[in-house]
Image: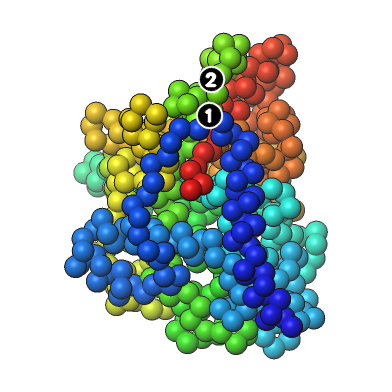
Amino acid sequence: MRKENLALIAKLVPSLRKFTGFLGSISILCAQPVLADRLTKPEPELHITQAELNNILVSEGSKNAFRTAFDVGDELFEHPFIAEEGAGANVGNGQLFTLVPRADLSGQDEWATHSPKRVTGPNAQSCNICHGQPVGDGAGPVVMNNVRDPLHSGDMGSFINRQPPHIFGIGALQRLAEEMSEELEAVQQQARTEALASNSEITLPLSTKGIEFGTITAFPDGTLNTSMVEGIDSDLLVKPIEWKGITPYIRAFVRDANHNELGMQAVEIAGDGIDGDGDGVADELSVGDITAMVIYQAAQPRPTTKRELARLGIIPRLSSEEITRIERGKDLFTEIECASCHKPELTLNDPVFQEPSRNPNYRDETFPAGQDPVQRGIDPQNPISFDLTRDIPDNIIRQRNGRITHLGNFQRNTEGGAIVRLYGDLKRHDMGAELAESIDEAGTGASVFITKELWGVGSTAPYLHDGRATTLAEAILLHGGEGADSQHLYQSLPDEDQTALITYLNNLVLYKNED
């Protein structure tokens, strides 16, 4: 009965997804212009090998390899995996999925003995079940929060809670992190060179893209003092992914999410031919599958604004009163120092995303299961690549006057780079005791979180890492620690100015063609 029921669910979920996606789209789509269709092509296969992707790269070129990987990744992101494919795991009483980590199950093939270890779930059959608000690849409501037990304690007091964020623009975040880390590494090398030349200690500020990460001191013998580094680890790597800022690149995020949330174990995380979670299925996701999912997520469109959507005729024109409030809120955002951490924009010098990354710190030297990525076709000399300012497949809009707008692409500047309006700084900050978690999951501090990018925030209530803030006003009022000054300044504003600030934030939305 279990397999028959899962098969029935597998048939129903795509229809439900389209229906709920339609309802989510209605919330912001009115007077919609004609949408430019993607190139008509057969439905892609669900799985793909890295060898197949590399053959396309060699024989058909980079553009076709990118589009193939994107389309396969799209299918994998939406696919409701079933038990025969490896979905779920043994979580007791014959069940495959759980919303609560089960460290109490320590028998053969049970949750606590899975390899590699799980910190949550499995709790879903597809990625878009959690990332679907208000449109596909968006955020998740509180009911989709994942409960984590990083210590495998089985103690509910040591559990932590995570709300699924949207994944729009995530490729630009990785590229920003790569460039920022390279610039910080250059400062470190400069300090070492000057210390050696002067035979004295040299302290330099760690600054990149207008963001300060403390200082670093080098000594003539080549050693370093990193005790004054702020907001990142002493390795000077900017890690833009997860609420704690602990994951540097999308590939690591993708395979861990598949393992933890879906129970789908990639060969690069479990090993070739290894059934690491005792569900009777090995090799559940190939190296090529993970590459496809990386490309799909990295090529998600940028978030937008209601004002931009109104200009394109996607939603009705905004009232003059709302526009006035948005403009006033924009000024207030800077005045009460929100922009000191939630920086409205950063500039990306090179907008080309590559998988694997050209930066060795943002790709695997070896896979978690020990394989050599280059031998498995993940070669930085032959990457799948695309331009974030030209090649985003979604949100291509043909207006009624015939003009085509590539709404998903990031804006290109005059130097050939990209303007990334993220409202963030990719830096960790202490947010005060009220937001501190019961455990320090990653050694970064129980009350320390990476600045959450605010792009799309008007579409992704509730707020904060665990969804505890049901409104933006509540989220602001919960800012403590390094955010306390902005909280106090917000509280001191007259009501009409508080309303203007919230209106400005609600202007930052997600949009996607659901065709």
How many residues crowd mark 2 within 10 Å: few (<14), some (14–19), many (20+)?
some
Residue 212: name its quadrant.
Answer: top left
- The first of marks 2 and 1 along the sequence is 1
* Residue 264 place in picture, x, y as percent: 56, 73
The colour mode here is rainbow
* Residue 80 place in picture, x, y as percent: 59, 67
Q: Secondary structure at mark 1?
A: loop
Q: Residue at x 21, y 64 (%)?
A: 60
- Left or right: 159 with respect to 337? right
Give the total of numbered labels: 2
**Which image quadrant: the N terminus?**
bottom right
| Amino acid residing under circle 2 | Arg
Q: Which of the labelled discs sits on residue 51, or is there none? A: none
Residue 3 seen in render: yes
- C-alpha span from label 2 to label 1: 10 Å
Residue marked by disc 1: 31
Residue marked by disc 2: 317
Q: Residue at x 63, y 63 (%)?
A: 13
Q: Secondary structure at mark 2?
A: loop
Q: Residue at x 72, y 81 (%)?
A: 2
* Residue 59 place in picture, x, y as percent: 19, 68
